[in-house]
Image: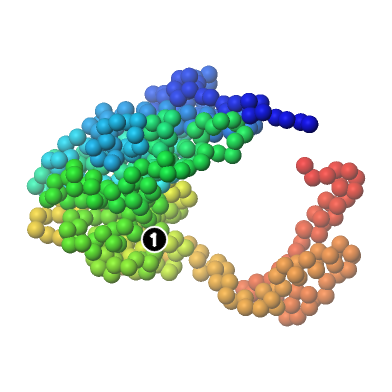
Amino acid sequence: MFRRKWSGLPKDPHFPVDMKELGYFINEDDEVRAIDNPNNYFKFFLNRNPRWNERQRFAMNMAIQGVIWERLEKLGMKKELLPLGTEDTTKPHVPIFVSKDIASASRVVVIFGETHQDLGVLAHRVIGGQGGVNKGSMVSIVSALQQQSCSSTDMSPPGIILANTAELIWWPEGTRTLARVAFDGVPMKSAVHNGNLITDANLVEGNENTMRHISYMFKHVIPHFVDDAATIDIIGVGDGADCVEKYLDLLTKQDEWKNRIKCLALVGGLVPAYELQNEEFVKVILRNRARAYATSTEPVGMVLSGPDGNPKTRTFTEQGCPVFSSGSDHYTELTLIMARDIVLDWLQEVAMTPEGEEYLNPEYHVTFADPFLDECESDWGEWPTEASAGGGEKNELREVKAQEAGVENEPKELGEDKAVAGQPRLILVERPKALRARNSSMEDGEGEN
């Protein structure tokens, strides 16, 4: 009888958490390049076995994060551990970054990133590719904020807090928390194990998930580090923006937060205003002191919609606040990178509102519409029946079979009426010939690759 022992399973691959040992360096353009060929960026597909690729990526991401954290600390950011008061780093804790002079700041910017990005990271596709480490990380955001002023009467830079909405899974062997994707890359008992099991031992008290972490930030972290008279600016990115918006929908029912939150930037968020429960939050904060920056093919800064939405664009705009193009056409993780200047400039505009006055979004009369929207067949409801839609897939299949058999289709197969300009109609030209060619090649023994 065949018997395989646990010791006979292939060992999990090991990669050093060191950029130089992995074969990479950071060039003068702040981009990660290969040592053996400086023209090459990071190579993910190192092996046909996906486990080898995942383990290398885990080591590389940890090495890059070490570089980012070092740069944040040089900018005056200090790493703090949650729950507050944690001193033993071998016990479960979640790291965040807080500016050293935050206690004296009259204005504080709190940033909630995406729930799958490592602390300090905006987009690895920029960090490990064209753009570089600073541009693809929070280093560029912190640097820009430090050039701003707290208010028209306080020219000192604002305080900054970087929340950690992703790295909430405790890894005992590494004495740190990880994001869900990163946790899949930690060492396993063998290279063929199904993954690492998450139990209660992998949870951090008070920060068990993203919503609890956001709650802990508002209930404990901000009151602990920030002066009670300081104003709060909030930036949310991607699904981190969705989570913080849903939490603020409940939090702003408390009077103490209504006036402290001066502005809310939802970068890549997608929460519909009609799903929110607090009418005052929607009509006061969202409408007057919030802006959304959406993925769009339009140039960065283009006004896509006012607070009531824009039915003439395919971009989702029913967010209860003015919606702008972020300049990123597809990737949510690039929204804050592309829209950094307009987002931070708006925060500064709100902060410079004269003392005693309340900032209000201007009235937007948006005439923007997607190009060629009226010419596109966007309303499929105009085709209520199979006949008016040209028969759909059934007629297409009948056409193919008929033409393969050498029988011409009767006009009624595509609809008894003649084609009318602007009316949809199925016309197959090349497909039967292609099918015959494919069938012929398969008969000759030339199968598909």
Q: Total marks drawn?
A: 1
| Rendering coords of residue 61 (x, y %) | 45, 32
Q: Give the residue displayed 9% in from the left and 47% down from the top.
A: 153
According to the image, label 1 marks what residue?
A: 271
Question: Furthest-front residue in view?
Answer: 1
Q: Give the residue displayed 78% in from the left and 75% down from the top.
A: 413
Give whichever of 300, 80 is nearer the camera. 80
Give whichever of 110, 88 is nearer the camera. 88
| Res 414 quadrant in image | bottom right
Answer above or below: position of 34 versus 253. Answer: above
| Rendering coords of residue 193 (x, y %) | 59, 36
Question: Furthest-bottom residue in view?
Answer: 417
Q: Is residue 117 left or right of residue 346?
A: right
| Rendering coords of residue 157 (x, y %) | 17, 40
Answer above or below: position of 162 versus 295. Answer: above
| Res 133 quadrant in image | top left
| Res 20 quadrant in image | top left
Q: Give the residue displayed 70% in from the left and 29% down from the top.
A: 4
